[in-house]
Image: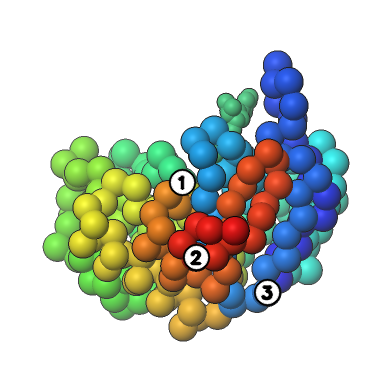
C-alpha cells in the first residue's frame, strides 16, 4: 500500500539530511508505530508521505499513486480522497464548531454521512460537544476532534502525529484503541508517531527513527 524507497530530505542550514535514504513498506490495512527523539524527523517523514513536502531524492508510492510524479492538483485529489492526517498541532478551523470541523473532510470528498460522524464522535467521547466553538475546548478535546476529522471521510491511509500527546493516560488508552479499531475494521492503513509505549504496542509493527532511518524494534522499544 505504502512504499518508500531511498527517500532523503535535507533542510537548508541543516548540516545533514533529517531523512536519509529511508526505505519502508507498509501493507494495506496494517498499522505501524514510529518513535524517536524530539527533532529526529518524525513529523517531516509524515509530511513527505502526505505529499505536503517533497523529498530531495527517492520515491514515495501510496496505493497506485507515485507522489514524486504527481502534479499539484493530483496531489490535492490524493489528499482529499485517500488521506486522513492528524497534525501534531491539530490545524483545526477556528471559525467552525466541532461538528463542522469534523464534517469538513467528508463534505470535501463528497461522502458525508451524519450517522457515521455521530458514531465516530461517540467513540471518541466528544459527541456532547457537537455545537461547541473550538475556543471552548481543551487541548485533549481538540485532539479528539482532529482524530474524528481524519477518519470521517474513510481514507485509505491515516497519518497520526502524536495523536494522544495531549491526553491523560486513561483517555489516551481509549482514544488510541478507538483509532486502531476503526482503521482495522475499515482496512485502513495507519501510521502513528508516538512517544507512548502503550500506543506503540497496538500497532502491527514498531519502528524507531534514528539518524534519518527507520529501524524495526519490539513494541516495547527494544531492538
Ligand atoms: N520546514 C522546515 N524548514 C527547516 N527545518 C525544518 C523544517 N521542518 C522541520 N525542520 C527541522 O527538521 C528537524 C526535524 O523536525 P521534525 O520532523 O519536526 O522532528 P520531530 O517531529 O521528530 O520532533 C528539526 O531539526 C527541525 O528544526
Ligand atoms: Mg513532530
Seen from the viewer's position, the closer of residues 142 and 8 is 8
- First of labels 2, 3 by sequence position: 3
Q: Which residue: 45% across, 52% down?
A: 194
Q: Which residue is mark 3?
A: 27
State the SS at label 3. loop
Between tags 1 and 2, which lies in front? 2
* Numbered tag placed on residue 87 in the rendering: 1
Where in the figure is residue 126, as x and y percent of width and height? 21, 61
Identify which residue, 184 or 116, lies in the foreground: 184
Locate residue 94 relative to residue 179 in the image: left or right.
left
Where residue 162 appears, as percent x and y from the top left, is 43, 49
What residue lies at 49% left-to-right and 65% top-to-bottom?
A: 219
Where the C terminus falls, by quadrant?
Answer: bottom right
* Ligand 1 within 8 Å, label 2 CB: no
> Which residue of the protein is positioned furthest toward the top in this rendering?
13
Count the marks: how many?
3
> What residue is drawn where x is 54% and y is 33%?
39
Among the two numbered marks 3 and 1 on one chain, the one whose residue lies closer to the N terminus: 3
Task: Residue 78: tell me if it is visible.
Answer: yes
Secondary element at image label 2: loop
Query: To which quarter of the image does residue 12 belong?
Result: top right
- Residue at the spot x=76%, y=62% of the render? 3
Distance from the alpha carbon under mark 3 to that under mark 1: 23 Å
Please tell me which residue lies in front, 135 or 140: 140
Looking at this view, name the residue that lies furthest to the front. Answer: 223
On residue 219, which mark appears? 2
Question: Would you say 157 lies left or right of 59 here?
Answer: left
Amino acid at each position: 500500500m505504502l512504499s518508500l524507497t531511498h527517500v532523503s530530505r535535507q533542510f537548508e542550514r541543516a548540516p545533514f539530511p533529517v531523512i536519509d535514504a529511508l526505505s519502508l513498506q507498509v501493507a494495506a490495512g496494517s498499522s505501524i508505530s514510529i518513535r524517536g527523539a524530539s527533532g529526529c524527523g518524525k513529523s517531516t517523514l509524515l509530511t513527505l508521505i502526505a505529499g505536503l513536502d517533497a523529498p530531495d531524492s527517492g520515491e514515495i508510492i501510496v496505493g497506485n499513486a507515485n507522489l514524486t510524479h504527481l502534479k499539484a492538483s493530483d496531489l490535492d485529489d490524493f489528499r482529499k480522497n485517500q488521506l486522513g492526517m492528524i497534525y501534531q498541532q491539530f490545524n483545526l478551523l477556528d471559525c467552525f464548531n466541532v461538528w463542522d470541523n469534523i464534517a469538513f473532510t467528508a463534505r470535501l470528498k463528497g461522502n458525508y454521512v451524519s450517522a457515521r460522524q455521530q458514531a465516530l464522535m461517540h467513540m471518541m467521547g466528544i459527541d456532547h460537544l457537537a455545537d461547541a466553538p473550538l475556543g471552548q475546548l481543551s487541548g485533549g478535546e481538540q485532539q479528539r476532534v482532529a482524530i474524528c476529522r481524519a477518519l470521517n471521510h474513510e481514507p485509505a491511509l491515516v497519518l497520526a502525529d502524536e495523536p494522544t500527546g495531549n491526553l491523560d493516560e486513561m483517555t489516551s488508552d481509549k482514544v488510541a484503541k478507538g483509532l486502531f479499531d476503526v482503521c482495522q475494521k475499515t482496512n485502513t492503513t495507519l501510521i502513528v508517531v508516538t512517544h507512548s509505549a502503550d500506543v506503540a504496542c497496538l500497532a502491527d509493527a514498531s519502528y524507531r527513527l534514528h539518524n534519518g532511518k527507520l529501524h524495526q524494534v519490539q513494541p516495547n522499544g527494544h531492538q
